[in-house]
Amino acid sequence: MDENLELLEHIYKDCDMSCITLEKLLIELKEKDNKIKKKVEEILKDYEKFLKTSKKHLKDYNAPLEENSMMAKMGAKMGIKKEVKCDNSDAAIADMLIKGITMGTIDMEKKINNYQEIVNKKYLEFAKEFLAFQQETIDQLKIYL
């Protein structure tokens, strides 16, 4: 598989899944009085921007958009609902988000390290920008712990 395509698809799928889970989280928090809601809304907007840009790059590349599986989406939604039902404190939500985003950063770092000599510089810079956003988001969420 083309490494450019693989890198872009990875970002697209990560952003797509993140948007789905953050939207579900906001629905679950709608009637609750959490301070973290505003931060979750900001994070969602940023993921939506990266999703839009990754979609544009994939279209420029003439690649079909490969969606996350329905099972993965349903599992994520059910997991969010369960976690919020068990503990909807800001600290618990921040912890859950940090763990999820951290998994994404690890995968992104691997892709960047493996492909930095191979992929188009424009896509590599986009991947690095996405990784920096993820790392910054983790740092911002730590204040809620």
Image (cartoon, grey):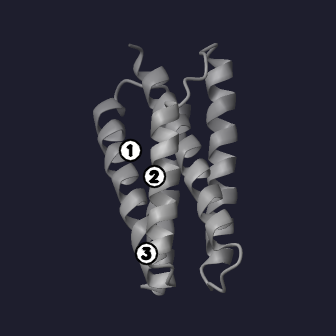
- Give the CA distance from mark 1 to mark 2: 6 Å
- Label 2 element class: helix
Q: Which is nearer the eye, 23 or 107?
A: 23
Binning the other alpha carbons within 10 Å of mark 3 as few (below 14), some (14 to 19) or many (20 upward) gives few
Badge 2 crowding class, 10 Å Cα cut-off, few under 14, some 14 to 19, many 20 or more, is many
Identify which residue is drawn at 64% across, 13% down.
Answer: 62
**Could you say where residue 128 lies in the image, as x and y percent from the top left?**
47, 47
Q: What residue type is labelled 2?
A: Leu
Give the residue pinned by disc 1. 108
Q: Which of 97 and 2 is in front in this view?
A: 97
Q: Spatial distance from mark 2 to mark 3, Cα to Cα?
A: 30 Å
- Using the image as rendered, state which of residue 3 and residue 91 is in the foreground: 91
Left of 13 or right of it: where is 31?
right
Q: In which quarter of the image is the N terminus?
A: top left
Residue ID for mark 2? 131
| Of marks 3 and 1, the one in the foreground | 3
Say which element carries label 3.
helix
Return the disc, 2 or 3, that comes first in the chain's sequence: 3
Specify the label residue 86 is tagged with.
3
Point out residue 95 in the picture as x, y percentages from the top left corner: 40, 73
Q: Where is residue 52 in the image (x, y as percent from the top left)?
A: 70, 39
The type of residue carrying mark 1 is: Met
| Quarter in which the C terminus is drawn | bottom left
Q: Which residue is drawn at 64% across and 73% down?
A: 29
Asked if one can make out residue 121 in the rendered structure from this viewpoint, the answer is no
Do the residues bearing badges 1 and 2 touch, measured as CB atoms within 8 Å? yes
